[in-house]
Amino acid sequence: MLGVVTGAHGVRGEVKVKSFTADPRALGRYGALWDARGARSFALQVRGSARGLVIARIDGVDTREAAEALKGVELFVARACLPKPRRGEVYIADLVGLAAVDAAGQPVGRVERVLNYGAGDVLEIARPGQEALLLPFAAPMVGEIDLASGRVVVAPPAEIEARGADPEDAP
């Protein structure tokens, strides 16, 4: 997801978009954007920014009411339109499904989702027969990411590892 429409801006159909791109104003450079189902495309022209949001015009949206109707629409782009990540970088979507292992290579679980509640990304790691493990996506909790082998090395806090050994021992 590259962004989400947060509402209308003005009365001529412009929208406010929360951008998840490194450069928010680059949102218009990716070409056609799509809704989550891939059913509707949006040609977006960035007009400016205000209060951390991108102000944009979408072809065919000419009234405030039409812009308001798009509130909450998530904007996606075809993977082929994204630039190749730089060395040491990954796309968040590539983390989902990776096997999570500890430093010794022992299985911890599988990355189910990547969450962000405003303070940074958090890996949700599904563990069979146990509650999901939530780890900040930052060192030292997350180490090596090896997309080719489909795994990420994680370091759960010691108290979680101890509890995770036997669900019956959990407090």
Image (tube, rainbow, N blue to C red):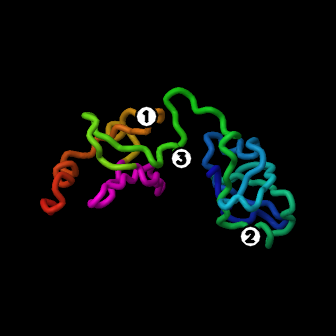
Question: What residue sits 70% from the left and 40% below the top?
Answer: 81
Q: Residue furthest left?
A: 169
Residue 90 placement (x, y as % from top left): 52, 37
| Magenta region includes residue 131 | yes
Above or below, 11 against 106 in this view is: below
Residue 102 placement (x, y as % from top left): 28, 39
Viewer-proximal residue, 103 or 118? 103
Cα–Cα span, label 1 and label 2:
44 Å
| Magenta region includes residue 119 | yes
Majority secondary structure of magenta residues: strand
Amino acid type of disc 3?
Ala
Residue located beneath label 3 in the image: 93
Above or below, 161 against 62 in this view is: above
**Earlier sequence position, callout 2 versus callout 3:** 2
Above or below, 54 against 80 in this view is: below
Cα–Cα span, label 1 and label 3:
16 Å
Cα–Cα span, label 2 and label 3:
28 Å
Amino acid type of disc 2?
Glu
Q: Quadrant of the C terminus?
A: bottom left
Residue located beneath label 2 in the image: 68
Q: Would you say 159 lies left or right of 139 here? A: left
Viewer-proximal residue, 80 or 121? 80
Please identify, in this view, whether the residue under mark 1 or under mark 3 is nearer the observer.
1
Q: Which mark is residue 149?
A: 1
**Earlier sequence position, callout 1 versus callout 2:** 2
Please identify, in this view, whether the residue under mark 1 or under mark 2 is nearer the observer.
1
Q: Would you say 118 lies left or right of 5 here? A: left
Amino acid type of disc 1?
Ser
Viewer-proximal residue, 1 or 48? 1
Specify the segment rendered in magenta.
Answer: 111-135
